[in-house]
Amino acid sequence: MTDIQPIFILPEGKSREQGKGAQRTNIAAARQVADTIRTTLGPLGQDKMLVSGMGDIVITNDGATILKEMQLEHPTAKMIAEIAKMQEKETGDGTTTAVVIAGELLKNAESLMELNIHPTVIAKGYTMAAEKAVEILEKSAETISMNDKQSLTKIAMTALRGKSAEMGQEAFAKLAVNAVLTVADNGVDKNNIKIVKKAGSSIEASELIQGLILDKERMHPDMPRVVKQAKILLTDAAIEIRNTETKGKLKIRQPGQIQQFLDQEAAMIRNIVQKIADSGATALFSQKGVDDSAQQMLAKKGIYAVRRVMRSDLEALAKATGGRIITNFNEIEKDDIGYAGSVEGIKIGDEDMTLVKDCKQAKAVSILLRGATEHVLSELERALDDAISVLATVLAEGKIVAGAGAPEIETARQLRKFAASLKGREQLAVMAFADALEVIPTALAENAGLDAITVLTEVKAAHDKGKKWEGVNVFAGKAMDAWKDGVLEPLKVKTQAISAAAETAVMILRIDDIIASTRESGQGMPPSGHGMGMGGMGMPPMM
Ligand code: ADP
Ligand code: MG
């Protein structure tokens, strides 16, 4: 269970900390966050159960989610959480990795500070090392083509496996790959992949729909339940008479006039429905309302119709079916009509939905996610989201590396060589940086219940012999060629994690003064009666 008590900004009874004290406090807070999520790293990482004050529960293994849910008070703890946010945004994966590296960088910096190496020197060495590390990674990365479905599936599986074992299933990874490849169009817009979660079935029942799932049923029971080879009309116009406007102007002088007016209305509706039918449409999706009488007429013409469709869904339908959203029923053109192999009303659980599927060149798709419970579904969605983001990252960059700690070991090895070319204290900082990277294979091994030192010795020996993709086989408890084993990841996940971790560590190292600011509400800051080091320097009012 995660400890979600706040981490205080300053030690009890203090309003200001300077120099080494400040740095220690900062580093301790940041490390506490990193240590918390370190045990979740890798396929055998543990889950965290997060309980909110309201009693809501989230069970997850996702670094970004854990950090989002934790109530962090200390500013450097928050800075560490920011790394995860950035990592998630930039690459969709590697959040735990980034945070754990940052924590280790700070831990090693602390040791250097014990040796009286100034934080500025450490910061300089770290910055240099980070740049070099990115260079090393870029050199060792391999290119991947979009047609290489097999490797893409492995990349998706690696992203999924980091979450939970049962999600590493190939079928699930293939789902993500197919979804991404379908919507890929000069890059991947994740918004074109709609994830619809429905509890009550097993993961295996999840499926990719080349089209869209709408949480709306057809509007009239007399309409067909299924339309095959559907011709699709999308509209953002209402099919009803705007009552208030018209009726306000209506002055009835003779009894017959009411009937005449009603007839006119009916004629207008009939006219619209006729135009729809003339267009050849067999399925209609309207963003607005549809009059009762129009519903009946549409049903009679055998048209499947859904009303009050959300704008975003209507736009997704346009992308999926190749149709265009029309506003004027008098100007429907042939090209406005979209296509779907099937439009059908289905029941999932006890909800009525509409499935628009088997579109020909869908540029928007839906994934129907099934799982036993809401908790399982939420974790599945996060995993799937990671896989989709990672695939999008790969398609954008076209570069991959192996995982399982291999890139970290190789980068550390080459960094140590680079350090040898430097002099004095910076050399120590670069060495410390190299050591810090090895926290990833170490944590992977530890989380698998292995003796990290033994496994790492084996892995490092292989690297010394030129096997750059040798990593930790967490399942078998020994070294493995991670590339051959299919543990693949985007290059960007690694470079981003290292750069972000280094930048934040450096930022934290540069702080040597924590001052309780008057501008804050003082939340998380214990009231203090005897502040230290406050020489009338505009310090906050003390109680
Ligand atoms: P993050 O939030 O950093 O992505 P994860 O919990 O997803 O954290 O773990 C990612 C790490 O797990 C990476 O170093 C990745 O290479 C490693 N990993 C994923 N699958 C495997 C596997 N099958 N064997 C060994 N390591 C793996
Ligand atoms: Mg991951």
Image: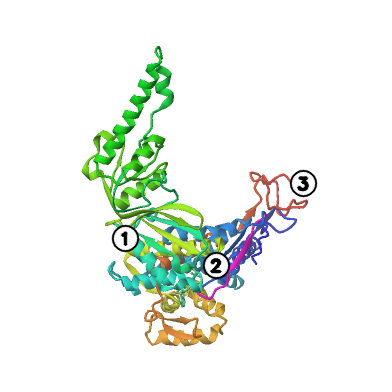
What is the three-letter code of the residue carrying label 2? Asn
Residue that numbered label 3 is attached to = 543
The vertical placement of 357 against 541, above or below, is below
x, y percent for residue 510: 55, 60
Which residue is drawn at the image coordinates 50% and 58% (left, top)? 349
Could you tell which of marks 2 and 1 lies nearer the N-terminus?
Answer: 2
What is the three-letter code of the residue carrying label 3? Met
Circle 1/circle 3 CB separation < 8 Å: no
Q: Nearer the viewer, residue 58 or 539?
A: 58
Using the numbered discs, state the Cα–Cα distance from disc 1 to disc 3 in whole angstroms: 63 Å
Using the numbered discs, state the Cα–Cα distance from disc 2 to disc 1 in whole angstroms: 29 Å
Q: Nearer the viewer, residue 406 or 180?
A: 180
Which residue is drawn at the image coordinates 57% and 81% (left, top)? 449
* Residue 133 in sight from this viewpoint: no
Disc 2 vs disc 3: which is toward the camera? 2
Queried whether the magenta region covers residue 281, the answer comes back as no
* Residue 369 in sight from this viewpoint: yes
